[in-house]
Image: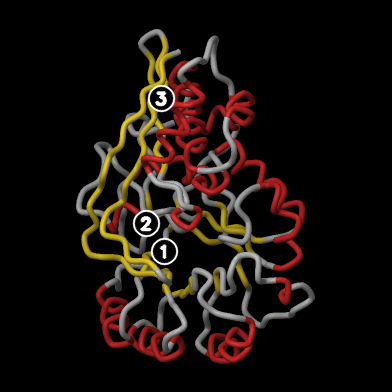
Amino acid sequence: MQITIEKVAFPMVAPFAITGHVFESSETLRVTVSKDGISGRGEALGAYYLGESADSMAAQLEAVTGGLTGDLSTESIQHLLPAGGARNALDCAFWDYRAKAAGKRIWELLSITPRQLTTVYTLGVASAEVMGERAREARQFANLKIKLDASDPIGRLEAIRAARPDARLIVDVNQGWDFAALGEYLPHVARLGIAMIEQPLPRGEDEALEGFKSPVPLGADESCLHLGEFATAARRYDVLNIKLDKCGGLTEGLALVDAARKAGMDLMVGNMCGSSLSMAPSYVIGQFCQYVDIDGPLLLKSDIEHGLEYGEGGVVGLPEPALWG
């Protein structure tokens, strides 16, 4: 079984700002698994806040795949690499290979009857005036995800809500508030009809959420990287955001779905602004989710060939076999 690793950059339409970071390009790692003329592909970006990059993920993969003998399996991949972007790319490539080798779609392998998903469209951090205008320009999207930091968050939300009284709004703070700020903002967030607040507090500084009753559902992103952190997150949050780049691939993503459903948590699928090759396996996770965020390709100047089709309202067509799965 041959494993090919390459770095592929996708420039963004415009600089994309979140708490503490501005992204101008999506630096992806693409892995191809091949045997007997059949190939499967996977893509990863890793978690920037953990120091992952295309270079670091490539080095991680090269260190463990150069001496491989025999065939891969979903189980062996889990033991080969820790949770993170490198394992995600390899795991998703192997799932794609499995589907193509079996002559089946991913839905058949997993016994899922797929439904079309409706994604949010994400607005990066900007002034209240600019964010309101961007919300108005995104009128074709029924669901908007709003990136906020500690600067005038309610003013920004007021402007967006005024521009889009019809939209379902999700807020993503990317660890940008503290507990006191959360308590101050929550009444306003509830008044504005926000559906959910994602990762309001810093990772490792959210103990105060245990036993806290929020009037708006709170979601764990950076606070739950993988299955080993799930039990703690389940005590503190109402919603779990599953990102394959965090947890290390579709295999662990499906295990997180199972754990969250058993715990009675709602689910979200997220992305790290990759191409449609990153979104396609996330589309599988999205089948179980109340919140869907797979808009990464819409933020890029160009997408991969056979990319997902995004329609009116944010409806996303099923991945084509030529793309993945």
Q: Quadrant of residue 143?
A: bottom left
Q: Height in image: 84 above or below 203?
A: above
Q: CA distance from mark 1 to mark 2?
A: 7 Å
Instruction: Note whether residue 196 is visible.
Output: no
Front: mark 1 or 3: 3
Circle nearer the N terminus (1, 3): 3
- Residue wearing tag 1: 120
Amino acid type, residue under disc 2 in the picture: Asp
Residue 242 in the image: above or below residue 17 = above
Does residue 49 appear to the left or right of 321 in the view shown?
right
Disc 3: which residue: 40
Give the class, few, some or many, for how many residues have Cα within 10 Å of label 3's Cα (few <14, many ≥20). Answer: many
- Front-most of 26 and 234? 26
Kindly identify the residue that appears in the image at 31 percent across and 79 percent down.
126
Amino acid type, callout 1 = Val
**Which element type, helix, strand or loop, lies under badge 3?**
strand
The residue positioned 48% from the left and 30% from the top of the image is: 90
